Image (cartoon, grey):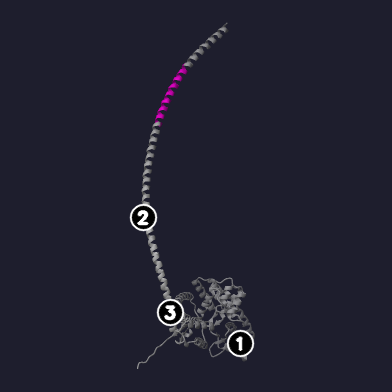
Amino acid sequence: MQYLLYLVFAGVGALIGYFITNHLTRKNGEGILAEARQKEKEILDEARASAQTELQKAQKKAKEIKEKELNEKKNADRELQKRRQELEKLETHLTSRIEKVDARAENLEKRADSLRERESELDKLKKDSLEIIEQQKKELERVAGLTPEQAREQLMKKIEDELQYEVALKVNEAEQKIKSSADKKSREILATSIQRCATDHTIDPIVTVVELPSEEMKGRIIGREGRNIRAFENLTGVDVIIDDTPEAVVLSSFDPIKREVARVTLENLTLDGRIHPAKIEEMYEKAQKEVNLRIKEAGEQTMLALGIQSIHQELVEIVGRLNYRTSYGQNVLQHSIEVANLASNLAAEIGADIQLARRAGLLHDIGKVIESDEGNHAKLGADFARKYQESPKVVNAIAAHHEDVPFETPEAVLIAAADAISASRRGARSESLEAYIKRLVDLETIAKSFKGVSSAYAIQAGREIRVMVSPDEVDDITAPKVCRDIVKKIESDMEYPGQVKVVLIRETRSVEVAH
């Protein structure tokens, strides 16, 4: 029963809860609906206001576009009107030009007609002129006695002579300018090179004086019945001169090495005091070794002083032997060193190979110490240098330094120039009177061998020759050619130190006597 009551109360409570919930739900729904209607109204009002605003904007924009289109149309109308006016002006201008062109064409036609008439007149005049010229030609031929070909030949010959004279004058003028400029530049280069290479010149004698410790030593040198002096002379190959000079004897020989070996031998004998044929042979062998050692040392010192490397030992010894050779009294080693320095200085001035010039300058005279009957010293030296693997440029410079073969490099030319400078310096070489006179005579003989030369005089110790020519046989045009021919003849036929200046003089005199 109690359980049933609980059920009844629970059912009543659930029913009451349902009604209450239903009532509350309905009430809430009405509020939400009213709120939604209010929000809907607000949204509609806002949309109407926005639409009205957009409509106003669209109307404003459409108005602006319409105004713009109206303005553009007005502008287009104005531009079109302007273009029409310009076209009208252009049409008017073209019409005027066409009228002018038509008028000018009419004038040109009239002038063409006039020119055709004048051309016809000119043709007639030309024809008449040709007839007159032909008549004059015939008259000139009759008067002159020459055909047109002969007259043309004479005229061409006259023009050719005049042109030849003008060309000779221009060539002579150009030669003078080039010679003046070249002489000035060469003098500057040579002066600079020689100044950098100031070398003392000494003339080596052909005799050597050996001082003795006492006068008694002369008798010991002579020996019993002269056996010591004969043995000494036969062994050394030199002449021993014993005169009245106190405490001295003289050794004479043209071979400096033999003379040096004899000097060392004699000095060692006088120091030892024992002089007899066997001792002479002993001291002679010792002196030979000592001199050979000096020769080698001289070659090595020369290479070191000049900075020359990678050279065969045989060539070093040959260079050392140059110290005991002379050329016209000039020491050949000193001459070779000077040539090497001069050539390297000249090479530096003109931009050539300095090392090559120095090497070739030192070796250019090595043929003078090579004993052979085949060829001159230039050829012998070149063959010897080639044998010991010297470069072809060095070989050519050695062979060509006396112009026996053509120059192949600028350095070869420099060697020849440096050799001439070293040999031609005053005091560098001694020259016999006979050779000096012979050179002067040869110069004058060569100059007199040319046609038109009346006389020739060698002056300035053979460094200049004055050549007088006959004005009837040599004119101003051919005078420079004769002068050049004399120079070439001297260069090809003579050997001389330095250079020879040839001065050709042509003089015309007119003499009248008043009575």
Please give the range of residues in magenta.
27-54
Label 1: few (<14), some or many (≥20) within 10 Å?
Answer: some
Categorize mark 2 by other alpha carbons within 10 Å: few (<14), some (14-19), many (20+): few
Q: Residue furthest top?
A: 1
For image coordinates 42% across by 71% down, the residue present is: 123
Name the residue nearer the viewer: 295 or 42: 42
Check if residue 127 falls in the magenta segment: no
Above or below residue 184? Residue 252 is: below
Secondary structure under the numbered disc 2 in the rendered image: helix
Residue 449: image location, x then y, percent: 51, 87
* Foreground: disc 3 or disc 2: 3
Q: Reply yes or no: does residue 43 show up in magenta.
A: yes
The quadrant the C terminus occupies is bottom left
Q: Write down the residue under mark 3.
A: 135
Give the quarter of the figure containing the N terminus. top right
Q: Residue furthest bottom?
A: 515
Label 1: which residue?
233
Mark on residue 109?
Answer: none
